[in-house]
Each structure stands twice: as C-alpha cells, then as structure tokens.
Amino acid sequence: MPDLTTMPWPLPWTIGVFVVAGAVTVAGSVRLALLGDTLADRTGWGEALFGVVFFGIVTGLSGIVMSVVAATSGEPDLAYSNAVGGIAAQTTAVAVADAFHRRANLEHAAASLANLLSGCLLMAMLALALLASYVPQASVAGIHPMSAVLVAAYVGGLILIRQAGVQPMWQATVTTETRPDVPRSHDALNRRPAARLWTQFTVVGLLVAAGGWLVTLAAESLVEITGLSAGFVGGVLMGIVNALPETVTAITAVRNGAVTLAIAAVLGGNILDVLTLVAGDLAYQQGSLYHTAGSEELLATTTSLFMTATLLGGLLIRQTCGWGRLGFEGILLLASYAAMTIILAL
C-alpha cells in the first residue's frame, strides 16, 4: 500500500478516493434532505429559511473544508476556484432537479419571497467578492477587510429575509401548480424526538464535511500528477463534488414534494460557498485570497453571478413549462455551465 501521507498519491488511489468520498457525500445528502424537511416543520422556520440557513451551513461544510485545506497547503487558486466553481455547479442542480418535477417547472412551483431574497443576497455577495479582487490589497489582523464585509452582508441578509417572512410585502400568485410550504406528515421521522433529529442532522453533516476534506487531498494529487490547471480541477472537478450535497438534496426534496426546500438548499449552499472565500482568506497566510484570483477564477465567479440572475428571472417569470420539461432558465443554466467548463478545459 502506498504512503498516503505523501503527496502526490498514485493515480488509482487518487481516483478511488475522489469517487468514494463523492459517494459518501451523496448518501449523506439524501439523509439530510429527509431530516431537514422534518426539522423545517418542527422548528416553524419553513423550508425556504431553514434551507438557506441550516442546509447552507451543513452542505457548505464540505466546500469550506476543501478551500481551507487547499489554502493552508499553499494552493490559493484551488481554494478560490473550488468555492466559485461549486456555486456554478450547484445552480445547475436546479435544472437537474427540475427534470424530476413532473407537473410543472420547479421554479414555477417553488416561487417564494424567501427564495427570491436569498438569490438577491447571493448576487450581492458574489459582487462583493469580485470587488475584493480589484480594490487595493490590504490586511487587518491577517485578513482582507472584504471578508468582514461578506460576513456582515450574510448576517444582515438573513435578518432581512426573516423579517420579510414575518411581515411579507410581496407574494407569488397561487396557481394550480404552486406547491405551498405547509407542514406534512413525515411518518417515522415525525415521531422521533427533536433532539435525536438534530443529532443525526449534525453527524451526517460532519460526515459530508469529512468527504470534502478527502476530495481536496485527491484534487491536489490530481493537479500534481496530470498537470491539469488548478482552475479546471477546482472550478469543475472539485466544484462538481462540492455541489453533490445540494444536487442530491434538491432531487430528494423534489421527489418528496418539498419543492421550496429544493431551491432553498441550493441557494443556501451557494451563499455559504461565498463565505468559503472568507474561510480560505483566513487560512491563506501569504496575503489576500481574493487577489490570487486569475482569469479562470474570475470567469467562474462571473458565470456564477450570471447563473444566479438567470435563476432569479425564472422564479419571477414562473414559466409553467418549456423545452424538454425545462423552462428558459433551465436551458440557460445548463448552457452557461457547459460553456464555462469548455473554456476552463481549453
């Protein structure tokens, strides 16, 4: 057996770890979706806000671990591209989950004020991350000031979303295909004590995070062995694995009728991925993580920003049906991600 403490690993071991860790992430995410749907009803937070906060934190753990490990290992471009590449891949997951919603477009059925505001928060945070790459490089207590701004924007955004839910000033028109967020019976899960559900939710989330750590090590080994660019490995390969929790969660939620949770889980994970840049900036000791972003990383960031705007457009227009059971936004999401992947691979 090769020495796994020495990098790079042999190619077969690298691929094996990448695949197994990804499989663990998928299995954990299915369980998270079922537990999260139950807890959203138990807490009274609702699927949208619960998905943005708790799903965002738990499913975002793997991405945070990936970027922190990469930044600590002196791979800032890998840390940055993993975060923004994950956002692009996760947003594409909405189009994938839409294919599993049989009646109408997912964005039509899941339109809600909380999901719209979450999308706005995500766009604002992505714009701030882009701005950080162009403002003068600075450091306060070892971190760039924009990291503090991003955290403040996240907290402030969640407060506004919570307040808007209590006193809504906007509401989506209810149609025959609208699936409102109402508490449902969850059979065996609903009969379990809340403390047990929270414990399972936390343990599974930590397991998903551990999978993210292994994926990062495998990705670093892959860069060294194959000579692939960090932008491609981080933005596409790590980004896809980083997106697995949100993708599987969204599909599972749709199949269980929790359509609002499906969108919220993706947006929540994306928002936490922007905060992954903050974690990477803290871990990177050679300067500002934002200023290590090259053309490939900025391409992934800009693509993620465009894809988020496209998703918001879909939630606002609420097209009932479209080509191949996807709305215009689903087609644009798939095309945007494919174009980004091809450009990064060239």
Image (cartoon, grey):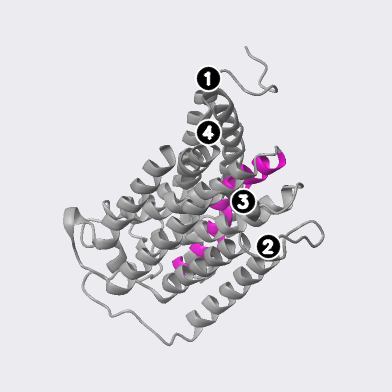
Image quadrant containing the N terminus: top right
Image quadrant containing the C terminus: top left
> Dot 1 surroundings within 10 Å: few (below 14), some, or many (20 or more)?
some
Looking at the picture, which amino acid does disc 3 mark? Thr
Instruction: Return the x and y of residue 262 as percentages of the image width and height.
Output: 39, 58
Q: Nearer the viewer, residue 217 or 309?
A: 309
Residue in the picture at 66% in, 21% down: 4
Residue position marked by numbered label 2 in the rendering: 147
Circles 1 and 4: CB atoms closer than 8 Å: no
Q: Nearer the viewer, residue 157 or 331?
A: 331
Instruction: Return the x and y of residue 144 as percentages of the image width and height.
Output: 72, 60
**Left or right of residue 158: residue 332:** left
Instruction: Return the x and y of residue 235 as percentages of the image width and height.
Output: 49, 44
Tell which circle, 4 or 2, labels the residue nearer the N-terminal end. 4
The boundaries of the magenta stretch are 46-72
In the rendered structure, find residue 199 and report the number of the disc placed on it. 3
Circles 4 and 3: CB atoms closer than 8 Å: no
Residue in the picture at 59% in, 42% down: 78
Tell which circle, 1 or 4, labels the residue nearer the N-terminal end. 1
In the image, residue 109 above or below residue 167: above
Q: Nearer the viewer, residue 10 or 36?
A: 10
